[in-house]
Amino acid sequence: MAMHAHAPITDAHLHCWDPSLLSYPWLDSVPTLRRPYFVSEHIAQTAARGVTRRVFVQADCAPLQALAETDWVSGQDAIDAIVAFAPVEDGAALETALRAFATRPKVRGVRRLLQGETAPDFCLSKEFVAGVRSLGRHGLTFDICIRADQLPSVTQLAGLCPEVVFVLDHLGKPPIRAGLLDPWRAHLAAIARLPNVVAKISGLTTEADHAGWTTAHLRPFVAHAVECFGWSRLLFGGDWPVVDLAGGMARWMDAIEELTADASEAEKRALFHENAGRVYRLG
């Protein structure tokens, strides 16, 4: 089934990697994904479904190779924007990274993963806050990839940096597998009250039961996100190829089509294309 065949789609969250080129230590724990994934494969899976623009998000290679990852991806034609890694809390190294990004026009944002941090207020250190603020001065967004229990601390962070656009990946990874809406529901509402935060409807199937999920499992989480953020502050993302762990890209696109079936054409256009264009300056 063609998805919104009449309207273009921007995939605001995809990865690609080549483990023979760069080191991705986390793939050791996900052996099924330890192979090259190139943009050409994403195109093959999504072009017929209307995906015309693609935003690459850093794929957590070894930190010292992050600029090499950015350059490798920059060379791939079908990538329209890059959310690159930068060591946000390390002032001198961050400045070096920001200088490098200034000569790489596809870089529109930064992601420094927080989901693996155990200290609850890691992102509230003065160094981290200062680093995020400097992203704003360079016109870069900050993608937040966290566990659901970290939502309160990143809400504080976003409140401290009103000049920075924050992009909450995967709706903050709600515990869909357990079917637990609370306390995620209140925490998502709190971060959505900040006007400088948008969120990606992405990565949800991997938070559900990988083999057993249905659209019904995702529906209350997506509905709450729409209630909190409205259609103008949500971005569609595929989270390819991680989505392959939970049924793949086609199945996720079928699900999100079903979940947005009652939305107006204008609302769908915002979610699937226009909001990503605005947030990542895709023109």
Image (cartoon, grey):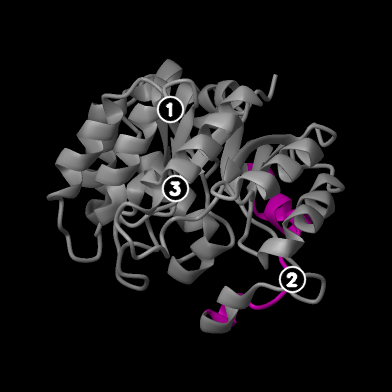
Label 1 sits on residue: 161
Measure how far apart labels 2 and 3 are at the Cα level. Answer: 22 Å
Measure how far apart labels 1 and 3 are at the Cα level. Answer: 24 Å
Q: Tag on residue 36?
A: 2
Label 1 or label 2, whichever comes before in sequence order: 2
Q: Residue furthest left?
A: 182
Label 2 or label 3, whichever comes before in sequence order: 2
Report the residue at 25% width, 29% height from top: 228
Answer yes or no: do the residues labelled 1 and 3 have beta carbons within 8 Å? no
* Dot 3 amino acid type: Ser
Report the residue at 66% width, 65% height from top: 61
Label 1: how many Cα within 10 Å (few below 14, some 14–19, many 20+): some
Residue 35 belongs to the span the image colors magenta: yes
Label 3 sits on residue: 202
Label 2: how many Cα within 10 Å (few below 14, some 14–19, many 20+): few
* Between marks 1 and 3 in the image, the one whose residue lies nearer the viewer: 1
Residue 280 belongs to the span the image colors magenta: no
Q: Which SS does the magenta portion mostly show? A: helix
Q: In which quadrant of the rendered view does residue 156 lie?
A: top left
Label 1 or label 3, whichever comes before in sequence order: 1
Label 3: how many Cα within 10 Å (few below 14, some 14–19, many 20+): many
Q: Residue furthest top?
A: 266
The image position of residue 257, as x and y in percent, is 41, 40
The image position of residue 105, as x and y in percent, is 80, 31
Q: Which residues are magenta?
A: 30-48
Q: Secondary structure at mark 2?
A: loop
Q: Is there any visible trace of residue 6 in the rendered image?
A: no
Q: Tag on residue 35?
A: none
Q: In which quadrant of the rendered view does residue 102 lie?
A: top right
